[in-house]
Amino acid sequence: MSINLDAENVDLMLLVLAHIVVAIIVGWLAGQLFNLTLGRLAQRTKNDLDSKLVKVSKRPLSVVVFIIVLQIARDKLSQFPHWVGSPVFDWLNDFIFVIGVVVASLWLVAVINTLIDWYLTNIAHRTKTALDELFLPLLRKVSSIIIYFLAITVILSHFNINVTGLIATAGVASLAIALAAQDTLSNMLAGFTILSDRPFREGDRIELASGIYGDVYHIGLRSTKILTRENTLVTIPNKDIANAVIINHMLPDGIYRISTTVGVAYGTDLHKVKAIIFDILKSLPEVLDEPKPTVFFLNFGDSSLDLSIRFYIADARHRRRVTDIVHMAIKDRFEAEGIEIPFPQRDVHIISHK
């Protein structure tokens, strides 16, 4: 649209520019006053969230006051009918609308990002789940994209630009992206399920039906990493691990039971053997007093009297080390007490016929 710069339009343009200058000055003063009053009040609180919100709201508030002053100027100009239809008047209306939408969207994004960043810095590490630490950064990006998209749509609609095609294109593009990233989305949804259901936590010793055994190293949105006893890092897609049978040796309380057997020679006093084993288990700090250890006479073996020993430790990750300690202690004590640990043997009788 071309602007006819006749005398009336020139006068109107100068008047509009004067109001813009006044609006800028008033907006700047309002921002300074806002920062001076609410900023000082925010500094008296125990956390810094309100101070951060005041900081990100200072400039948007200045622009809001700027827009209000321009709106007042526009309303005054509308009292002159021969100016209402002028190009400058239309330009002022469009300018106020666009600035308002842009500032509102930028301020909303800034507030959301400030709230999320503050939560991640001050609260997230105190929660029992890592879901918020993984989900909130994604929410920050998605919310920003949605807000900016809506702002662009509103501005285009104001200028009578058909946004139906834009929305349809965005829908088709979203569908194409979703189909292309189907596995990624499945893994992300499974990751949310794992983080919310919490069948295991980082650091837990778990065992999968597939035979993978180790400590949970990291739980991500797309995959879970397990560090095996061989110090090998195994990465498993979340959709696979979410459908797997999982044995968590650290839940519900981390206490883990170890079962082992020992055989003694026939003719050995089993009451004495039981007393010795209980004494050994009681003397080892790695073995818990509660739940109490148990020793049972299991069966009559081919070469030995077999006893079942069960005891508990505080951490499943130490089961091999503690089992070794118990076995060594039993062997040393049996040797000191003269208790024989037999091994399979056969007596072969040869009969000769002369």
Image (spheres, rainbow, N blue to C red):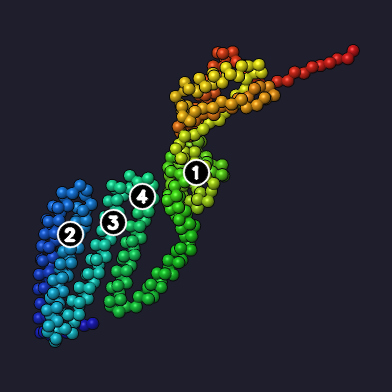
Left or right, 50 with reference to 156: left
Q: Residue at x 26, y 55 (%)?
A: 114
Q: Earlier in the sequence, mark 4 or mark 1?
A: 4
What residue does disc 1 label? 234
Q: CA distance from mark 4 to mark 3?
A: 14 Å
Q: Earlier in the sequence, mark 1 or mark 2?
A: 2
Q: Where residue 211 sits: x, y (%)?
A: 56, 42
Q: Are marks 4 and 1 in contact (CB under 8 Å)?
A: no
Q: Is residue 50 visible?
A: yes
Amino acid residing under circle 1 = Val
Q: CA distance from mark 2 to mark 4?
A: 28 Å
Q: Where residue 46 sits: x, y (%)?
A: 20, 47
Amino acid residing under circle 4 = Glu
Left or right, 208 with reference to 86: right
Q: In front: 121, or 338? A: 338
Q: Are marks 4 and 3 in contact (CB under 8 Å)?
A: no
What residue does disc 2 label? 58
Query: Nearer the viewer's eye, disc 3 or disc 1?
Result: 3
Q: Circle 3 sits in a helix, a strand or a loop, which is it?
A: helix
Q: Residue at x 15, y 68 (%)?
A: 66
Q: Earlier in the sequence, mark 4 or mark 3?
A: 3
Q: Is residue 249 above or below residue 352?
A: below
Q: Is residue 109 above or below residue 240?
A: below
Residue furthest toward the bottom?
Answer: 82
Q: Where residue 193 sits: x, y (%)?
A: 45, 52
Left or right, 211 with reference to 11: right
What residue does disc 4 label? 133
What residue does disc 3 label? 113
Q: Is residue 87 above or below residue 186?
A: below
Q: Earlier in the sequence, mark 2 or mark 4?
A: 2
